[in-house]
Structures are given as structure tokens and as C-alpha cells.
Image (cartoon, rainbow, N blue to C red):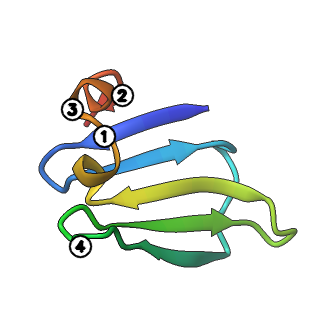
Amino acid sequence: MNITYDSVADCAYIEFLPHAEPVYFLKCITPTQNNDNTYEMNIDMDNNGHIIGIEILFASNAFPQETLRTFHQL
């Protein structure tokens, strides 16, 4: 498993199967009570429905800054 973070795009990616080719994805939007900390997730899957990776958009709303600093920075 590999976790990366791009601070310019505010996007994190959790990669489970590094050499697999995504065929489709499932989009999830996670609202919060005040809508200030909303983030989105795209779940990449292969032909067999295995999860290849999870992209988290607006990652700074989903993770504390100290956690983001532990991810591989792009």
C-alpha cells in the first residue's frame, strides 16, 4: 500500500494494487454537519471489482495536517 498527498491539488491517493489498470470508479461525497469540511472520494476498481485505490479530494478536510505530513508528498 502506498499513500501520497499533493498539497497543491489537496488530493490524497491510497494505492492498494500498484500495477492494476482501473476500469471504473465509484464517486462518494461525504458532507459534514456544517459543510465546511466536505471531501470527496473516488474509488478506482478493476474488471473484477477489486479496489485498486482511493482518491480523496479536499484531503485537508478529511485528515489532520499532522497526518497529511506523514504521506509521501508529490
Q: Amino acid at mark 1?
A: Tyr
The residue at the point 72 percent across, 57 percent down is 51
- Alpha carbon of mark 2 to alpha carbon of mark 1: how far? 6 Å
User: Which residue in the structure is indicated by mark 1?
Assistant: 5
User: Which residue in the structure is indicated by mark 2?
Assistant: 71
- Residue 18, position as x, y percentages in the image: 63, 42
Mark 3 residue element: helix
Mark 1 residue element: strand
Tag of residue 65: 3
* Residue 4 vertical placement versus 20 (above, below): above
- Alpha carbon of mark 3 to alpha carbon of mark 1: how far? 11 Å
Q: Which of the two discs, 4 and 1, sits closer to the camera?
A: 4
Mark 4 residue element: loop
Q: Which of the two discs, 3 and 2, sits closer to the camera?
A: 3
Residue that lies at the very extreme toward the right in this rendered image: 48
Q: Amino acid at mark 4?
A: Asn
CB under 8 Å between callouts 2 and 1?
yes
Q: Is residue 37 left or right of residue 49?
A: left
* Residue 64 vertical placement versus 13 (above, below): above
User: Which residue in the structure is indicated by mark 4?
Assistant: 35
Mark 2 residue element: loop
Q: Which of the two discs, 3 and 1, sits closer to the camera?
A: 3
